[in-house]
């Protein structure tokens, strides 16, 4: 459990940087050298290597050496664990969206309509739902 | 696009801490005061408040004041954006799992079987799949 939690720490920590997310997006197209990964970014090669190291330590990227060139590959399994963790909240945001949709589609409840009839329009009618 | 990226920075950054993930898990059960959120953790109330502030800045939590008590509520929409981002990699890890499953289930390819016939059994027969 502790190991799983530490793994999520490093996965989410690695994903909290736009350059690292861009590196992972590049790797969706296939393996790439450090130079390939550096070319779209306006940062130095050592800076890209530092990001690659963070991704590798989080298990999101693996490297292999062919001759003098290092190639990076996407290692997607930590992303699956991160998605599994987030998925437990899916029901919650789907419920929120459903409630909003129902609220937007529904007619005013009959009780409120009856209340309104004998009285003049309220000044602060937007607050009636929270009473 | 920049705003979306900054939002993902703060969402993933907020999720990279086990106490903050535990606070979000507590809020799955419903709204809670800062004291309710602090009670399962062996850290001070100010430390919990600091974590709550990070979650609030990431839009993952909202607060309302009832009398002198502040209640926290889960705000799940940044999690949906995070899941959407991760989902683009799902195909990749599913492909990896499918390839592994096919590899484990498959018979040796016909060419390899033909090769075997004219020869006596190999000493290291477990390695024939990787030849």
Image (spheres, coloured by chain):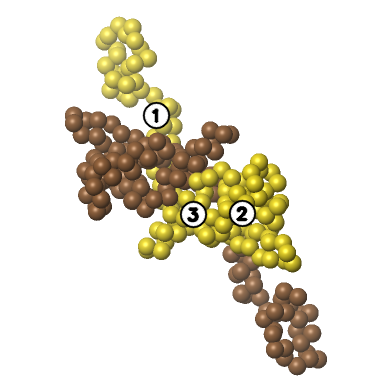
Chain colours: A brown, B yellow
Give left or right: position of A43 versus B20. Answer: left
Q: What residue would you read off at disc 2?
A: B49
As drawn, the residue found furthest toward the bottom would be A120
Which label is found at residue B11?
3
Q: Bin the neighbour count of mark 2 within 10 Å (Cα to Cα): few under 14, some 14-19, many 20 and up.
A: some
Which residue corresponds to the image point at 43% horizontal and 54% vertical from the top-left? B9
Nearest to the eye among marks 2 and 3: give it. 2
Contact flag, marks 1 and 2 (Cβ < 8 Å) = no
Q: Both on one chain, marks 3 and 1?
A: yes
Q: Earlier in the sequence, mark 1 or mark 2?
A: 2
Q: Nearer the viewer, residue A123 or B111?
A: A123
Q: Both on one chain, marks 1 and 2?
A: yes
Q: What residue would you read off at disc 1?
A: B103
Q: Bin the neighbour count of mark 1 within 10 Å (Cα to Cα): few under 14, some 14-19, many 20 and up.
A: few
Contact flag, marks 3 and 1 (Cβ < 8 Å) = no
Q: Nearer the viewer, residue B115 or B99?
A: B99
């Amino acid at each position: 459990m502790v190991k799983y939690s530490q793994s999520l720490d490093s996965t989410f920590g690695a994903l909290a940087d736009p350059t690292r997310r861009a590196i992972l997006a590049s790797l969706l197209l296939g393996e790439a050298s450090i130079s390939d990964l550096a070319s779209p970014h306006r940062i130095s090669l050592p800076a890209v290597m530092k990001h690659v190291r963070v991704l590798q330590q989080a298990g999101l990227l693996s490297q292999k050496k062919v001759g003098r060139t290092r190639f990076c590959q996407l290692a997607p399994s930590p992303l699956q664990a991160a998605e599994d963790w987030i998925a437990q909240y899916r029901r919650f945001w789907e419920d929120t969206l459903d409630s909003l949709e129902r609220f937007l589609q529904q007619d005013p409840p009959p009780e409120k309509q009856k209340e309104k009839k004998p009285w003049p329009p309220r000044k602060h009618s937007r607050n009636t739902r929270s009473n």
